[in-house]
Each structure stands twice: as structure tokens, then as C-alpha cells.
Image (tube, rainbow, N blue to C red):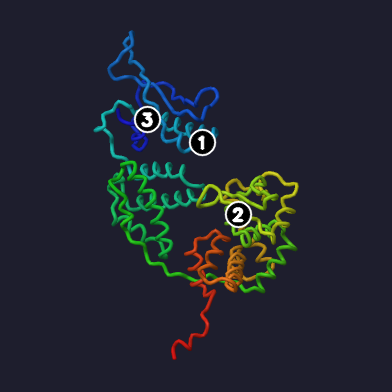
Amino acid sequence: MASILIKLRTEYFTEYSMKQYSKVKIYHGGKDFDLSKRWYVYFNYAHPTLKNTDGSPKLVQQNPIYYNINKLYHIKSERMKALKELRDDVEELLKKGWSPYENEESRIQYKASYSLDFALKIKKTEVKETTYKDYESRINQFKDFLNKENFIEPIDKIDKQLISKFLKTFPGAKNRNNVKAALSSIFSILSDESLIPFNFIKEIRNAKVRTKATKLIDAKTIHKAYELLKEQDQDLCVYIDLISIMFWRPIEIVRIKISDIDLSNKLMVVNTKGKDSKIKIIPSIIYDVVANYIENRTGNMFDLKAKSDIDKRGYMTERFRKFRIKNKLDSKLTPYSFRHYRITQLYLTLRETFNQEETIKQLSLITGHESKAIFNYIHTNDIELPEDYSDYLK
């Protein structure tokens, strides 16, 4: 019996004239919604040879469909939502005429666009919303490219030449490499699902990226902007503190809930890009600011009306831009300018006590960046210059 998971990747067939299947149902661990049990989707389908006493096709229950959902979802609401989506997909297939009794040899090859959507759906279960949105955008760009190229072949007919041609449509080496990385990740899923023999995108070399120095804003401008923030926008000021003193990313900040903040132990726990949760200390320099800001608040630390985390981040970015324009500040000033200023300040202060290697280790612990990233930042931006080396040349 052909697997329904394979058919989820295929083009749909014409609708049967008579109904040959039962309603697709969900088993959710019993009346208690027991998460320790395996939840699944199931249905009955007309057997090609078995008949009822009245001569009608006998509906036979098919194998349960798990679709890796039990492994991926451990919260009742999330698992139920995923199963409902799977149920709807199965129902759509059945409406279009798919039969679980088709011979394996009769499977038609799946068009590239459907294969990419299938892999994208799997990727959605593996990454956070912001990361998924990037994958979705890149894959949609690739699908548009395939349409312009009049490419209507199955996914396994895509080759290096076509991928390279697509990558060349993007300006800038870093941009091309990011697109390539997204495509490669999706093609790895296609390979895992046996839709392509292997992920050949891994063999395409990355374009050489020229490292550019970060635009560092002078201390006078930073201090002036910060004083204006304190006077004009308390929310934005606290937001900047979390970016520049606690070194959270903007997308992480808009996720912070009051329940994530433990004032008694001076700790904050937030969902991050690299892991489900990251714990950071609340340094004394910002402790009172945080404590006073969240007093009598519930829910999220920042009460933003936007629906998604991406939209919330965008709202705060735009709010800062308006603040900058209103006060006629340097057009290069961004929330990250305060972060870079603080990192530079920390590095130079730590270097008064520690050697470079130990300083980078200490800074890595504070910021959450890898040591290599910090070293590259210091080197690229000339944060530390050598002492006069004339004596070594005599």
C-alpha cells in the first residue's frame, strides 16, 4: 500500500464519482487527551476487491497516520492544531481522488512547486516564526524564478546550473549566501524524504564576502540620544536598555513576558534564535529600571498590539526611526548603535584587567555571542590598536 505521506507530495487526481471513504478522524489519546499516547489521523477506504453483503465496496480502516507529530508537539493545543491540519490535508487528497491502494509504480512525479511547499511545511515545525518567514520568502522567490524560466519538470530535474542561475539574480555575496543556505536547508529535507537523490546545493561554493566595518556612533551622540529617550519615550528607552545592556535581540525582547522576569534572583528567561530559552542575569545598572517598569504590569513586558513577533519588532524599529527624525539625530543611528557602543565600552574596560583572549571569553559570556564573532567584530572595527612596535623593527 502506497504511503499517504508520499501522496501528500503529489499532484492531485480527478474526483471520484462516488464516495469511497469515511470521514477522516483524529485519535487524541482518549477523553483525557493523554499526551503519553500516540495521537494520529485515521479513516476507512473502499477495498478494491472486498464487498459487503449488498455488493457495495467494503470500507477498510487504513493504517494510522502519525506524521512525526507526536515527536514534534508536546503541548495539547499545539498537537491538536497540527493533527487538524494533517486531517484537512488528507481529506483534500481523498476529495481529489487519491486511493491508498494505488500501486507504488503508478505514482506520478511531484512538481517542483509542490515539493518545495511540502518541504517548507516540514521546516515550519522545526524553526521559530521569524526563521520560517525567511525560508518562506526565499522559497517563494525561487518558485517565481522557476515560473519565469518556464520550468515545469519534477523537483529531481533541478540541477546546479539552474540553482546557480537563480543565485546570480541576487546582488551582494552575503545576500546570495543567505539565499543559498535557505535553499540548501529545504533541499536537505527533500533528500531526507527521498524526493531527490541528494542535496547537491551543499557542493556549490559560497561567494566570498567582504567584511564591512560597523558604523560606530560617537559617545556624544549616543549619550544625547539616550537622554532624549529618557525624556520623551520610556518604553523605547527600556527597549534600548535591553538591547544594549542585556544584549537581547529585538525579536527576543518583544517576546518577553512578565513571568519570564525573576526579580528576586535577578534573572530573565527568553526564547531565542538559537535555543528554546536563554537565561541572563539582570545587571544592577538596569535592575531598578526593569523593576519599576514592570510594576503592576501583566502579560507581555511590552504591550504591543501587532499580531506577530515580526510585526512587533517592526513597530519598535519604526518608533525609533520617528524618534531619531524628530530629534534630528544622525541618520545612521539605530537601536543597535547603542549595543555596539556598549560592547566596545565593555571590551576596552575589560582589557585593562585581562589579556585579549580572556577579555573575549568574558565578553562572550556577557553578550551571548560566540568568541569568534566578537574577535571578528574587534578586528574589523579596529576596536583595539597595537602599541608602537618600532622597537621590534630596529
User: How far is mark 1 from mark 3, CA to CA?
Assistant: 32 Å
Instruction: Kindly identify which numbered label has been placed on residue 382.
Output: none
User: How far is mark 3 from mark 2, CA to CA?
Assistant: 52 Å
Q: Do the CB atoms of the residues marked 2 and 1 lie less than 8 Å apart?
A: no
* Sequence order check, earlier mark of 1 and 3: 1
Q: Do the CB atoms of the residues marked 3 and 2 lie less than 8 Å apart?
A: no
Image x and y of residue 240, in percent? 65, 60
**Mark 1 Cα shell of 10 Å, populated few (<14), some (14-19), many (≥20):** few
Q: Say which of marks 2 and 1 sits in front.
A: 2
Helix, strand or loop at mark 1: loop
The residue labelled by disc 3 is: 96
| Front residue (pair 283, 236) | 283
* Sequence order check, earlier mark of 3 and 2: 3
Q: Which amino acid, mark 2?
A: Lys
Image x and y of residue 285, in percent? 69, 61
Give the side of residue 167 with respect to residue 105, left or right: right
The residue labelled by disc 1 is: 74
Helix, strand or loop at mark 3: loop
Q: Which amino acid, mark 3?
A: Lys
The residue labelled by disc 2 is: 280
User: How far is mark 2 from mark 1, CA to CA?
Assistant: 26 Å
Give the side of residue 65 with respect to residue 47, left or right: right
Q: Which amino acid, mark 1?
A: His
